[in-house]
Amino acid sequence: MNTMALKFIHLLPSPEEIMTEIPMPTYLIKLKKERDEEIRKVFLGKSKKFLLIIGPCSADDEDAVCDYVERLAKVQEKVKDTILIIPRVYTNKPRTTGEGYKGMVHQPHPDQAANMLEGIHAIRRMHINAFKSSGLSSADEMLYPENYSYLDDVLSYVAIGARSVENQQHRLTVSGLEIPAGMKNCTSGDISIMLNSIKAAQLQHTFIYRGWEVETSGNPLTHAIMRGAVNKYGQNIPNYHYEDLIALIEEYEKRKLSNPSIIIDTNHANSMKRFAEQPRIAMEIVRNRKYSSILKEKVKGLMIESYLEEGNQSIGGNHIYGKSITDPCLGWKDTEKMIYHIAERL
């Protein structure tokens, strides 16, 4: 079936078919429930652990991702009394202009043409294998709400990006999730848009989802992610400073939203796109939490872009294992050092 500009390539399998083909092992189902509850307690204020949602900008290579999360697991064991690590295994990549690599769900092989049928299989296998390798259930970005169903038994955290946070379908879908979902501030930095999105996702809704009329109960664990802003001149404006966070908490309280919580993205506009600034930003946030009891209560953790090798590279050519093919990331050596520094100062 085709129209003038729309070509139908494959009828994709349903989430149920994919889950049957690539099932979650029973022991991981049990472990995920335990992990979900531990993460949930942080957002409900029943646990004082500090969250680190950390990993590559985009998860483009299963071997490198599993290698990375295995290393994270070893660090997690050493900091388990104070820090709870959620690996970033991001399989979708939003593109500002629509050009470039869109993530493993589109291109399971970054140097080859798009193949979403293969991509759906690849992202599910990678998430499960990363979980097997580390014992750490992961986070992903919900760039396409309907694709979430292929991973809804695997993920322990979902982020809604700065370009998606105003979208109605994203907000309504999040209202039906049972895991924490972070809403990023939009690229302009207008926090009212993010807060409206949080409120919408915390409410009950009826809408169309994957061909069904569905009803949701609302997600009280929906919360803010501060990722910095870009002004009308294209300049990056950080929003992780003490004053920014206090202002956000005041707006949270005015709106009487459930479980007011904040995650801070240490990269993107907050770092002025300078990935090596992330450890400095992380330490400023840790210091401010020690200074302010209200920040210690509300700032639940950090989102950090990190991979095996620092920086980034182009697709193709002399490919370097474990180096980002999208935004530049902190390397492993500095990542490990940063996590231990955070743990010592919490």
Image (tube, rainbow, N blue to C red):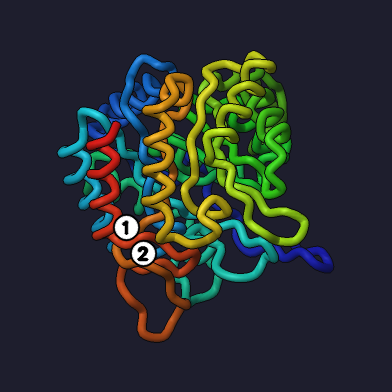
Residue 324 visible, this angle: yes
**Residue found 56% across the figure and 63% down from its top:** 102
Picture coordinates of residue 88 (x, y %)? 40, 48
Instruction: Please give left or right for residue 7 compared with residue 337 in the image.
Output: right
Residue 122 visible, this angle: no
Marking on residue 65 = 1
Above or below 51: residue 319: below
Front residue (pair 45, 181):
45
Q: Residue most toward the front?
A: 291
Front residue (pair 308, 331):
331
Determine the secondary structure under disc 1.
Answer: helix
Q: Residues within 10 Å of mark 2 (few under 14, many from 20)?
A: some
**Residue found 43% across the figure and 70% down from its top:** 312
Determine the secondary structure under disc 2.
Answer: loop
Above or below 287: residue 186: below
**Residue found 45% across the figure and 69% down from its top:** 325
What is the CA distance from the residue labelled 1 to the residue labelled 2? 6 Å
Residue type (three-letter) at the residue carrying disc 2? Asp
CB under 8 Å between discs 1 and 2: yes
Instruction: Please give left or right for residue 326 compared with residue 333 in the image.
Output: right
* Residue 65 found in image quarter: bottom left
Residue type (three-letter) at the residue carrying disc 1? Val
Front residue (pair 283, 204):
283
Q: Residue most toward the right?
A: 4
* Residue at the disc numbered 2: 61
Position of the N terminus, as image quadrant, is bottom right
Marking on residue 324 = none
Picture coordinates of residue 224 (x, y %)? 56, 32
Picture coordinates of residue 41 (x, y %)? 37, 19
